[in-house]
Structure formats: structure tokens, C-alpha cells
Amino acid sequence: MLKAVDYEGLRRREQAEKRAKGELMGIGISTFTEIVGAGPTKACDILGIGLFDSCEIRVHPTGGVIARLGTMSQGQGHATTYAQIIATELGLPASDIVVEEGDTDKAPYGAGTWGSRSTPVSGAATAKAARKIREKARQIAAHLLEVGEGDLEWEVDRFTVKGNPGAAKTMKEICMAAHTGNLPEGMEQGLNAVAYYDPPNLTYPFGAYVCVVDVDRFTGEVKVRRFYALDDCGTRINPMIIEGQIHGGLTEAFAVALGQQVPFDENGNHLGNSLMDYFLPTAVETPKWETDHTVTPSPHHPLGAKGVAESPHVGGIPCISNAVVDAFAHLGVTHMDMPHSAYRVWQQCHALGIDRH
């Protein structure tokens, strides 16, 4: 992180030069480790019910899939992520996979979407259900190819006979066969599975962020000139989905650090009664986010994934706030209350007497 932003150059050279000219430039850093993926029944429950989660997968003769889960997307792109997990595990096209969430009339039990638990818990249940189906498919493939199960290898979307790759059965062929009578003796038709996942532990995504701000000492306006976010959410199932979640979390952090509050006047009247009075950043105000990553898979998750949506909110707020305070650090300031709105920051400038020529 420090190398990526040339921290020494920012701190030692540019900031010193600006301060010598009376300009305010701040550099903030935050490092964090989050605890997400609420789920281990031994440690977490609601009214005694464990926070495990589940997934039901039904495969049609054509290879189409319906997956039902107890989570509910609020814009995180769950359908894309879950479909990709199933597609990878079963070798079936993601475009043929329908994901249904949150319908309690149809889905197996789930504890819902919160605490960055969808991929750490429901994603694991999805992988487990898909793997149950793949194991049954292996038995069917061995029966159709007249070999032992141990003689088969899995390759992307098919089982091949070891040493004879021309002898193979694709998943789509197996899906059709699973609904016929040509099955191993005693096996039920169909390729359906339900899996419940009670995680042995929470997951721990982490990150390191740097923020650079410029402060106008005459108006108190804070401009985020640069923000670099390095996140580690374990195995990255879909980088584009992750990128979108990080951008969203950082934008929330930007809003909290620089403007969001619920103010009251001296008589207790609420001064933020509508969204016209509440800071919701648009593309006009939101800075450009620089994102980066390392990958440290979770040791206990079936896919090594950890969860990511809350991390940029957790790390972004103190990072921006640290940068604002650092802009005044050489003047003896060690603390400033959030949100760092222009008026509040100007009050600090005025108290220091630097808002006048």
C-alpha cells in the first residue's frame, strides 16, 4: 500500500512543500481486520436458532438449474455470484442457472442477508449442495461408461476416463440420463440436493487504505484527491461484483465521514427531515476510487471466500477522517468530530486563525 501511493513522497516532499506555503494537505491511513459471516451456531444465534444457512439446487433434464436460498440481495449481485459458484462446481452454463432468494414459501431455512454473511455462509451452502450433485453425477457417469468411480477425472464440464479422454460424459448428458431409467441399481432419478452449512468459524477480511485530502482554509471544503483501497476478501469469486461492492462501501464511507448526520437545533427540532437535507453523494461529489487486492483464502470456507461488502465502509470512514485531521496536525490538532462538513472544518480553520489572508 505504501509503495503503491509513494507514501514517502507524499509525506516528506509534497506535504512539507504545501505546509510551507500555508496550504492544508492531509494523508490518512487505516488498517483493519473485520469479523463477518455470522453463522457458527456454537457462537451465534437468534433466540436460540443457529445462524447456519442453506441452499436447494434442482437440475432439469436439459441441464437448466434452479437454486433457492434464504438470503436476499439488496444490490450486491447475489444471483451472479451464486450462479457462478454453481456453474464452476457443475460445469453448467451460468446463463442456464436461475437463482431465487428470500421466498420463504419455497426456500429452505436461511438467516438472511446481513453482516457480510451471504458468500461466507450461503455461498458455502451453495458449493456444498453443488458438490453433492456432482458426486451423484460421478456415479451415473461411471455407470454409463462402465468403469469404476475412481477411474474418472473431472474436467470443467465432464467426467473422462483416466488415460482415455475420448471416453467421457458431459454434465448435460448426465442431467438427461439422471431422469431416465438407465441408472445404477437402487439410485433415485433426478439431480437435486439440499445442503445446510453451519460454519466452524467467522471469516476475517482485512485491508489497508490511504486517503489524500486538500482542505480550503478559507471555506473549509474538503476534497479527496486520492483514495487507494487494498482489500483481502479471500478467494475472489467474481472480481467485477467485488469491485462494485467496494465502490459502494467507499462511497458510503465518504458520505459518513464528510457530511452525514442527524442534527437538531437547541429546541430539539430535527433539521434533517428529508433527503434534501441529508448528504447522499452523487457522481459529482464522489471521488475516483483506486482499488487493489491481495488473496488470502479463508482456511475453513469450502471456497476460501470471506465477504467484502462492509469492509470498505469499516476502513474508509477512519481513513478519510484521519486524513482531515492530519491536514491540521502540524498546527497541534489531534481530534476533529465527524462529519467533516465544510462548515465544521471552517470552524476549525477559524479557531486557528488561518481563514484570513
Image (cartoon, grey):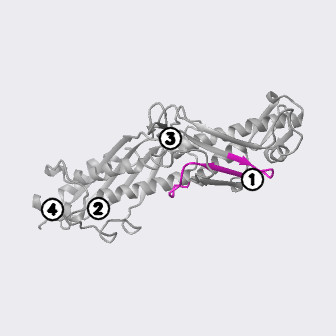
Disc with the residue nearer the chain's start (3 vs 1): 1
Disc 3 and disc 4: Cα gap in Å? 42 Å
* Secondary-structure class at tag 4: helix
Neighbour tally class for label 2: few under 14, some 14-19, many 20 plus, Cα within 10 Å: some
Q: Residue 75 carries which label?
A: none
* Secondary-structure class at tag 3: loop
- The residue sitting at the bottom extreme is 276
Disc with the residue nearer the chain's start (2 vs 3): 2
Q: Residue 306 carries which label?
A: 3
In the rendered structure, which segment of residues is drawn in magenta? 57-77
Give the number of the mark in front: 4 or 2.
2
User: Could you say which is closer to the camera, residue 166 or residue 217?
Assistant: 166
How far from the left and from the top, in percent, is residue 160? 82, 37
Disc with the residue nearer the chain's start (4 vs 2): 2
Disc with the residue nearer the chain's start (4 vs 1): 1
Disc 4 and disc 2: Cα gap in Å? 15 Å
* Secondary-structure class at tag 1: loop
Disc with the residue nearer the chain's start (1 vs 2): 1
Disc 4 and disc 1: Cα gap in Å? 62 Å
Disc 1 and disc 2: Cα gap in Å? 48 Å
Mark 1 lies on residue: 64
Mark 4 lies on residue: 347
Tell me if residue 60 is in the magenta stretch.
Answer: yes
Q: Which residue is located at x 66 percent, y 49 percent?
A: 67
Q: Which amino acid does label 4 sit on?
A: Gln
Drawn side of residue 108 relative to residue 143, left or right: left
Q: Which amino acid does label 1 sit on?
A: Gly
How far from the left and from the top, in percent, is residue 302? 59, 36
Mark 2 lies on residue: 259
Neighbour tally class for label 1: few under 14, some 14-19, many 20 plus, Cα within 10 Å: some
Give the number of the mark in front: 3 or 4.
3
